[in-house]
Amino acid sequence: MAKVLGLDSSTQSVSAVVLDTLAGSIIHEESVGFGTDLPDYGQPSGFIPGGDDGEVHSDPLMWLDALEILFERLAASAVDLSEISAVSGSGQQHGSVYLDEAFADTVRHLDPGQSLKAQILSHLTRQTSPIWMDTSTSAECAEIARAVGGNAEVCSRSGSVAIERFTGPQIRRFAKMSYDSWELTGVIHLVSSFMASVLAGQSVAIDHGDGAGMNLLNLASGDWDDELLGATAPDLREKLPPARPSGTVAGKISSFFVEKYGLNPECDVILFSGDNPCSLVGMGASSPGKLVISLGTSDTLFAAMPEPRTDPNGFGHVFGNPLGGFMSLICFLNGSLARERVKEDYGLEWSDFDRVGLARTPAGNEGRVMLPFFGPEITPRVDSADAIYHGWADNQRDPASVVRALLEGQFLNMKIHSRWLGVAPESIYLTGGASKNDGIAQTVADVFGAPVSRLSVAGSAALGAAIRAAHGGCGIPLEDLEAAFCQPEADSTVTPGDGTEKIYEELEQKWVSALHEAFSLPND
Ligand code: XUL
């Protein structure tokens, strides 16, 4: 048997991918959307609308209902669930589930005659779960940072400065605001470890990949950090599951899933991880040297790192790489919204962003620089309301130069703010909507001085989870899995153009000076 299951408990849905690792193919995909399949919860986008003070919560019982619908559909599909040897999963990062001590016992003895929801309901000590979109914890972030001696200290211990959506600050807010419920709480799970606990029929560990998104895990030791725990909430160590390597086999699948949906009692459950760590695996980038750039509403950049380096500016994050070592995640808010803005403002077509459009201007744009922040940006942290055209007059702003300045500005910003990773990329995997565009891919290759290949992996988090199940549960070599499931599209590779290295060295200096001048940033 070499069939494996990857699950993804994301913001808007719970989905599954089934791989046949012998045939090297995806044999089934399934998804349950909270808006479409569970409209009665009134959370069409996966969270409770209208939260106060930046609160964004979701209902963990909705996730359980979705998981059951997903397994019903899988059982009714052509997939024989008794042939699945291993399962792992991915969860939206940072979200937390608060349960009483008796949860551990209930989850060991789940009754297939009842729903998961009916059995878990009474164990929630907090009815809703704060998720990654929650921004309500600025005060708690400041308190945690102050208690351990500043954000540089939080970052060097945990891989990130104290961030509103991260689990530690969320836990602190709950402990401060609802102390009675806090005292009743026996265990706090992440979305990933909560779903894995239900699958494995025991309260399982939090993996290093997702655990690093809590502002609580000490990256160097791989264990919870006593200083950070103390700064966050009383008795926190007792309420956290242990932290373990992501490849840990949590146990066999719960008899609930065997009896109710026909899974094999010998099926192994591998610890779940966060969606970004799983995507790193699903994109075939879990070994250092490959940099993934995903062009979306926000652009993200992630890469495997052998060492736990941290961003001295505190913009980027470090999570665990599920296959060992670490990974970075850097988010740029002004992604496709900025590209769309230029397209609309200048009445352009996407073809103007392609090779032919970009050929109207030379690489380096004759030194014309744009700071492409059409709204507030987090990398770097600047409060901007519009793009800044540095050193060129209004009448020089023809559409072709503006498009080039925007793209060069976006990719220079990525290059500069990912340098702390300390790994020069050997190749770049470009994904997301705009990656299909050859001109954009060429600009990335020129700016970074590295070949760029295109990968369109739909559902990279679920695929990464399935690959982790195959690797950790069935011992299938990673190279074989990557060769079968994570290949760049044929003929999609572009290489840096001649002479572009020098051009972008010079442009980078200009761009950095413009940034410092515009936002009065100290010179590094
Ligand atoms: C990462 C983050 C999101 C969530 C949801 O820090 O907040 O990417 O993991 O996808």
Image (cartoon, grey):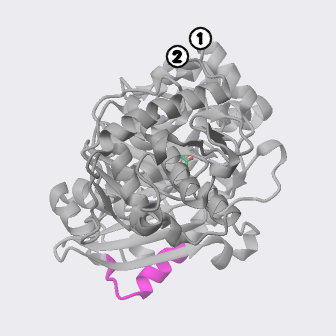
- In reply to whether residue 76 is colored magenta, the answer given is yes
**Towards the viewer: 87 or 118:** 87
**Towards the viewer: 225 or 380:** 380
Helix, strand or loop status at disc 2: helix
The reply, left or right, for residue 247 in relation to residue 431 is: left
Question: Residue 10 appears at what percent x and percent y?
Answer: 54, 60
Most extreme residue toward the front is 395
Crowding around mark 2 (Cα neighbors within 10 Å: few <14, some 14 to 19, many 20+) is some
Answer with the quarter of the image where residue 381 lies: top right
- Say above or below: 481 vs 135: below
Q: Any mark on residue 153, and which?
A: 2
Crowding around mark 1 (Cα neighbors within 10 Å: few <14, some 14 to 19, many 20+) is few
- In reply to whether residue 113 is colored magenta, the answer given is no
Residue 472 visible? The answer is yes
Amino acid type, label 2: Glu
The residue carrying mark 1 is 149
Amino acid type, label 1: Gly
Helix, strand or loop status at disc 1: loop
Question: Residue 212 appears at what percent x and percent y?
Answer: 46, 36
Magenta range is 68-81
**Towards the viewer: 173 or 315:** 315
Q: Do the residues labelled 2 and 1 touch (CB within 8 Å)?
A: yes
